Image (spheres, grey):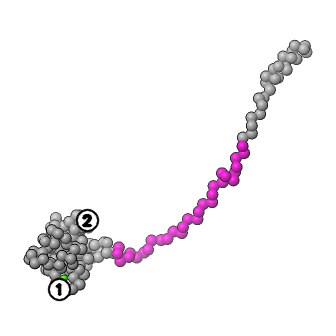
């Protein structure tokens, strides 16, 4: 092997030599990558089997449908309205003045209900007003209010007169 050849091989070897080792990548800290332990989920509580009274009250069909036929007729609505009137009239003078009537009748509604223009709404006037509202809520004129009719604006207005 000539000296020139050896030099060439050495030069080749130097060229082929691997580049200086790159700095070792920082080791991944496994402790940081470990996810935190999952929090214990709260125990699942089953829904109560019986409905609370306020839920029954929120469902007018259940609350007022005395004969349980799935609709409200005028007698059922008037019965609920009479109970509401009595509740609003603790002095039992058979009339609601504007202050007593405020939870159910304000302004124009009070004046409309107070057909006798005495400034007080009697129970008969109140039930007559409730009947007017019943008829407005019953466009199909079948004598009863179904769930869809009770959900209408007129049905909701009627509902506010009941208890
Ligand atoms: Ca009914
Ligand atoms: Ca009164
Ligand atoms: Ca109807």
Pair 1/2: label in front: 1
Residue 110 seen in this snapshot = yes
Mark 1 C-beta closer than 8 Å to ligand 2: yes
Q: Residue 74: x, y in percent?
A: 18, 75
**Front-lying residue, 70 or 26:** 26
Q: Is residue 26 above or below residue 157?
A: above
Q: Which mark is residue 93?
A: 1
Residue 144 seen in this snapshot = no
Q: Which mark is residue 151?
A: 2
- The stretch drawn in magenta includes residue 29: yes
**Front-lying residue, 146 or 31:** 31
Q: Residue 52: x, y in percent?
A: 38, 76
SS of the residue under disc 2: helix
- Which quadrant holds the N terminus? top right
Residue range highlighted in magenta:
26-55
Q: Residue 67: x, y in percent?
A: 25, 78
Mark 2 C-beta closer than 8 Å to ligand 3: no
- Which quadrant holds the C terminus? bottom left
């Amino acid at each position: 092997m000539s000296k020139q050849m050896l030099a060439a091989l050495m030069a080749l070897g130097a060229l082929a030599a691997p580049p200086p080792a790159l700095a070792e990548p920082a080791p991944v800290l496994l402790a940081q990558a470990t996810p935190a332990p999952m929090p214990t989920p709260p125990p699942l509580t089953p829904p109560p089997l019986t409905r609370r009274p306020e839920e029954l009250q929120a469902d007018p069909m259940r609350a007022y449908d005395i004969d349980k036929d799935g609709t409200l007729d005028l007698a059922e609505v008037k019965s609920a309205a009479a109970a509401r009137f009595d509740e609003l009239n603790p002095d039992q003078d058979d009339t609601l003045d504007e202050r007593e009537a405020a939870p159910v009748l304000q302004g124009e509604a009070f004046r409309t209900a107070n057909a006798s223009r005495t400034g007080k709404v009697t129970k008969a006037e109140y039930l007559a007003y409730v009947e007017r509202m019943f008829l407005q809520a019953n466009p199909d004129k079948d004598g009863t209010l179904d769930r869809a009719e009770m959900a209408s604006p007129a049905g909701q207005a009627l509902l506010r007169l009941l208890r």
